[in-house]
């Protein structure tokens, strides 16, 4: 992933040198396991650990000749440690190292993503409580519907990210496996006890059954969850973009003192960070399809999945980490305009209370169909005459057969729409 959309904590995990270090850890753990069951001499792992260094350039140079990355790695280590290097990788196959390493990198990345989500949850909770009763209009199809609060909108996002957190924990669990089963997964040349030892040493679980690889449905699940989380990121970003439009202007990304919005128009303050998140989310979701397609491989293995995973492994995790970090800062620093929210709510001059009037009419014994027709007629009349719905209703003598002025005006009370906010917040935050 390009540096512009990367954070070092994540990129460090996917750097080549770190990958080779993990390979060495796996090989050393396997060697320790072999020592314990007596299949190789005692002290091999200790000697190799003290002498082996990761030399990326040397590994590449050897690979240029042998055209095999694992062999190049093992050759490089053996050059440094001498004859004891021959005890490394005994009975193992390349995928034992590659897949176990990949899982370790995904677990490391997933834990950082979990922390990112925790930070977002903290900010959402704080902002939701701050704006718990900040009245704004709820919209369906982009059209004014009924009043809600901005805090309720944020609480909705919070609950979604709680679900995302659970999903990510499940995804990390899904790929926390280790395979040291040898060629075609039969353990013919490597004792099953080695896999058990390596798994425990590396804080993984045994893969119950591997062919020559760890089954790729595990990875499809992990990357699918990243795609879902990216969808939630875009959901919030899109909401902010809509609310920042000139015609709406209820929320605005923080705009620093020396920031410039446009090279041509000095007045512009564009929601560039949220727009950026929309693009990055699309990218993360695009990795889900190749991860799903990797499930199907030839027989016990082929390497059609390999090139895919070398790209989507780092890129999806690094991109999502960056997006989550950016989203946290947007939510933390955004400007919220309650007066504009209230102004926008009043644009339709009370039409948003139409359902309340209709329901009260049905309580008076009128059919729902007739009540709907009456209120719809007054809604159209109010719009055509540019008057409030309340004034239109007051001009209809028939209405007074059902309500007096006091009762009619009470239907237009905003507090009616916030009476269950505490209940909803208790469901979400307790």
Image (spheres, rainbow, N blue to C red):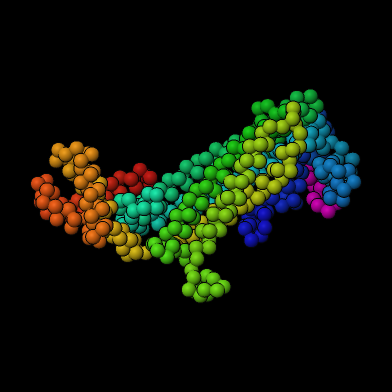
| 119 left or right, relative to 368 | right
The residue lying at 16 percent from left, 39 percent from top is: 366
The residue lying at 42 percent from left, 65 percent from top is: 246
| 368 left or right, relative to 65 | left
Specify start and end residues of the magenta stretch as a single range: 46-58
Q: What is the total number of numbered labels drawn onto the structure image?
A: 0
Residue 34 spot, x, y in % from top left: 78, 32
On the rendered image, what quadrant is the N terminus found in?
Answer: bottom right
The residue lying at 75 percent from left, 24 percent from top is: 186
Q: Is residue 254 above or below residue 96?
A: below
Residue 414 spot, x, y in % from top left: 24, 54
Q: Is residue 18 above or below residue 343?
A: above
Q: Main secondary structure of the magenta part?
A: helix
Residue 288 spot, x, y in % from top left: 61, 42
Quadrant housing residue 369: top left
For this rendering, which residue is in front, 255 or 384? 384
Residue 172 visible in image: no
For this rendering, which residue is in front, 147 or 116? 147
Q: Is residue 186 above or below residue 256?
A: above
Magenta-drawn stretch contains 361: no
Magenta-drawn stretch contains 55: yes
Quadrant housing residue 123: bottom left
Residue 146 visible in image: yes
The residue lying at 72 percent from left, 38 percent from top is: 305
Residue 169 spot, x, y in % from top left: 54, 40
On the rendered image, what quadrant is the C terminus found in?
Answer: top left
């Amino acid at each position: 992933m390009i540096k512009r959309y990367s954070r070092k904590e994540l990129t460090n995990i996917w750097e080549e040198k770190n990958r080779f270090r993990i390979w060495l850890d796996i090989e050393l753990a396997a060697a320790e396991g072999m020592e314990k069951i007596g299949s190789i001499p005692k002290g091999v792992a200790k000697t190799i650990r003290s002498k082996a260094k990761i030399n990326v350039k040397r590994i590449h140079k050897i690979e240029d000749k042998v055209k095999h990355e694992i062999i190049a790695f093992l050759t490089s280590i053996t050059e440094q440690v001498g004859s004891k290097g021959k005890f490394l990788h005994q009975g193992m196959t390349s995928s034992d190292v590659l897949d176990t390493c990949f899982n370790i990198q995904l677990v490391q990345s997933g834990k950082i993503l979990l922390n990112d989500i925790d930070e977002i949850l903290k900010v959402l909770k704080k902002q939701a409580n701050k704006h718990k009763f900040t009245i704004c209009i709820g919209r369906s199809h982009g059209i004014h519907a009924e009043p809600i609060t901005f805090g309720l909108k944020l609480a909705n996002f919070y609950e979604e990210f709680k679900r995302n957190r659970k999903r990510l924990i499940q995804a990390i669990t899904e790929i926390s496996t280790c395979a040291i089963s040898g060629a075609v997964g039969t353990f013919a040349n490597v004792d099953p006890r080695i896999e058990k030892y390596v798994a425990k040493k590396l804080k993984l679980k045994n893969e119950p059954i591997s062919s020559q690889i760890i089954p790729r449905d595990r990875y499809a699940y992990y990357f699918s969850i990243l795609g879902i989380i990216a969808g939630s990121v875009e959901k919030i970003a899109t909401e902010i973009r809509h609310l920042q439009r000139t015609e709406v202007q209820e929320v605005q990304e923080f705009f620093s003192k020396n920031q410039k919005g446009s090279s041509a128009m000095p007045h512009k303050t564009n929601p560039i960070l949220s727009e950026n998140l929309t693009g990055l989310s699309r990218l993360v979701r695009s990795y889900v399809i190749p991860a799903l397609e990797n499930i199907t491989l030839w027989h016990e293995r082929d390497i059609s999945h390999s090139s895919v995973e070398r790209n989507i492994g780092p890129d999806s995790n690094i991109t999502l980490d960056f997006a989550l970090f950016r989203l946290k800062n947007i939510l933390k620093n955004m400007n919220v305009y309650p007066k504009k929210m209230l102004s926008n709510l009043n644009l339709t001059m009370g039409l948003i209370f139409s359902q309340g009037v209709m329901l009260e009419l049905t309580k008076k014994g009128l059919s729902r169909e007739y009540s709907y027709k009456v209120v719809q007629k007054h809604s159209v009349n109010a719009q055509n005459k540019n008057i409030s719905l309340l004034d239109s209703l007051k001009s209809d003598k028939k209405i007074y057969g059902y309500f007096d002025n006091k009762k009619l005006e009470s239907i237009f009370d905003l507090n009616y729409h916030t009476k269950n906010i505490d209940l909803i917040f208790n469901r979400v935050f307790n």
